[in-house]
Amino acid sequence: MKIALCFFGLPRYSDYIISTLKQHLLNLYNVDIYAHFWWSDDMIGKFKHRACTDVWEANTIEHLKNLIPFKKIVLESQIHFDISHFKPISNEPDLKHLTVEVCKDTLFGLKSKWYSTNQSFQLIDKPEEYDYIIISRLDCDYSKPIDLSILNPNILYIQDGFRSGWDRGYNDIFTIGHVDTIKYYADIYKYIDKYHIDGIPHMHTFFEKLLKTDIPVPHQLYSFGVWMLHESMFKHYRKGAPYLTNQIKFIH
């Protein structure tokens, strides 16, 4: 089975993820790896993530290329997206307490994420030649083998986010689909303004509404066992969230 794996976002924590990435995905299929990463030399010495104290090193990209056999990789300096015209506060109960700056930072991150997602997908010259295309953050931990044989190519599969809470099912860190389904997912960037002009919703809410309204393909939440590494290493989950994920089953 031929697979295209598209990484997006920031090139962090490659040392931590490479063993499970190889064991549970790269060693199982014929995989071509593409990536669009935000990177510039002025990042060196700055924190990799707000939840940890690791800093970017000068050899980050060179080291990453030695670990992962990229077919194509593009590095781009961070774009400073204009978010000045957006109303910052959403009516969602769990967001009302946030400051204006936090809300604007959230929207900036969302634009950055979906722009990078689109750019990574665009690196594939002939997407129709792949059985499946996977779009993922780099800093993900794979807890079990990714079994593509049981998937339906007509469905867009989304790693569920219930580990972060019962109402966080729609997660955007790891998604699988045939080109005919995932091409719509890769184009989500163009919908951001539509869903945020009247107030910034939680990213899970935005993702869910968009998939149910503007993405013309069937989709399904599925537990591939792929989680953001920095959450496992540097944050404390809400009590009971991992247990909840193990209990919920999806029929495919």
Image: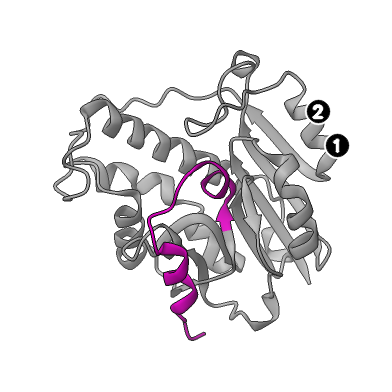
Residue assigned mark 2 = 62
Identify the amino acid type marked 1: Asn
| Picture residue at 74% right of the left edge, 57% below the top | 20
Quadrant in the picture for residue 59: top right
Nearer to the camera, 184 or 159:
159
Quarter of the figure that contains the N terminus: bottom right
Q: CA distance from mark 1 to mark 2?
A: 6 Å
Instruction: Reply above or below: 6 against 51.
Output: below
The kind of secondary structure element at disc 2 is: helix
Nearer to the camera, 89 or 167:
167
Which mark, by number, is residue 37? none
Residue assigned mark 1 = 66
From this viewpoint, which residue is outermost toward the left? 91
Instruction: Reply above or below: 20 against 104.
Output: below
Characterize the local packing of mark 1: few (<14), some (14-19) or many (20 or more) Cα atoms within 10 angstroms.
few
| Picture residue at 59% right of the left edge, 61% below the top | 226
| Picture residue at 45% right of the left edge, 48% below the top | 236
